[in-house]
């Protein structure tokens, strides 16, 4: 297998994880009631670009995780890594709900709220946002928990498979466990709950970097 083929999966994982990190860093802080949040969204010139960055990062990350599963095929870590890929797919699908909602309906309601004269149109925009946003946040919380479960499974597979460094497997189990705890303990409308995504995504950066280095070395 050529070097170009070997680096495709880890490169997808690295780009996907980094795109998620950049999008999360640029995302404005939403605080206050529905009207305040819609105002923040309407004033964010990069709002759509940020959320499209998230959405494009998800299939890239999943493609890279397929490469992680492929590296463990036929070995001792195959079963947990396979399970991690299945749960991870569910996690990204659930995560897509909140991101797609904010990129589409959230942006449309924010623009409607911003350009409307104070009155029924603005009131309806806030009402629609307040009614639909909790559903999207619930999907986000489930996604954070599921991504934590998936990361634990990936870490377990790395520990059993011994294809990648042992410290990477330990880090995966720890990162996934912390993510699960944050999603379980904190409400979906808190920063602590959103932090459930941080460690699993950083773990993906570590995994992709190690796999890329290995692919280049073997070349």
Image (spheres, rainbow, N blue to C red):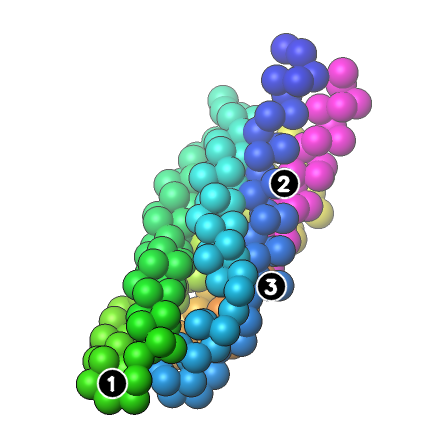
Q: Label 1, on which residue?
A: 123
Q: Residue at x 31, y 79 (%)?
A: 116
Q: Which mark is residue 47?
A: none
- At label 1, counting other C-alpha atoms closer than 10 Å, the crowd grade (few under 14, some 14-19, many 20 or more) is some
Magenta region, residue range: 199-219
The front one of 211 and 72 is 211
Tally the marks.
Answer: 3
Confirm or deny contact between disc 2 and disc 3 (CB under 8 A).
Answer: no
Residue 185 picture location, percent across and down:
44, 77
Residue 150 is left or right of residue 211, and the answer is left
Q: Which mark is residue 26?
A: 3
The quadrant of the picture occupied by the N terminus is: top right
Residue 46 picture location, percent across and down:
54, 61
Q: Nearer the viewer, mark 2 or mark 3?
A: 3
The quadrant of the picture occupied by the C terminus is: top right
Residue 158 picture location, percent across and down:
59, 39
Look at the magenta stretch and give its main secondary structure: helix
Confirm or deny contact between disc 3 and disc 1 (CB under 8 A).
Answer: no
Ranked by sequence position, the earlier of labels 2 and 3 is: 2
Q: Label 2, on which residue?
A: 14
CA gap between label 3 and label 1 equals 28 Å
Residue 76 is left or right of residue 133, and the answer is right
């Amino acid at each position: 297998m050529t070097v170009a083929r070997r680096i495709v999966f880890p490169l997808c994982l690295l780009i996907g994880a980094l795109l998620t990190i950049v999008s999360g860093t640029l995302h404005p802080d939403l605080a206050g009631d529905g009207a305040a949040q819609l105002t923040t969204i309407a004033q964010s010139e990069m709002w759509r670009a940020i959320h499209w960055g998230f959405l494009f990062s998800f299939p890239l990350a999943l493609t890279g995780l397929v490469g992680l599963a492929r590296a463990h095929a036929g070995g001792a870590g195959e079963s947990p890594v396979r399970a991690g890929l299945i749960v991870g797919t569910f996690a990204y699908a659930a995560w897509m709900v909140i991101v797609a909602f904010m990129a589409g309906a959230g942006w449309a309601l924010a623009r409607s709220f911003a350009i409307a004269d104070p009155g029924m149109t603005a009131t309806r925009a806030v009402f629609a946002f307040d009614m639909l946003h909790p559903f999207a946040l619930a999907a986000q919380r489930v996604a954070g928990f599921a991504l934590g479960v998936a990361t634990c499974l990936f870490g377990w597979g790395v520990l059993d498979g011994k294809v990648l460094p042992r410290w990477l497997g330990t880090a995966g189990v720890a990162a996934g466990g912390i993510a699960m705890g944050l999603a379980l303990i904190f409400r979906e409308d808190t920063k602590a709950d959103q932090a459930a995504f941080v460690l699993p995504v950083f773990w993906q950066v570590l995994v992709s970097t190690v796999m890329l280095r290995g692919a280049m070395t073997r070349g």
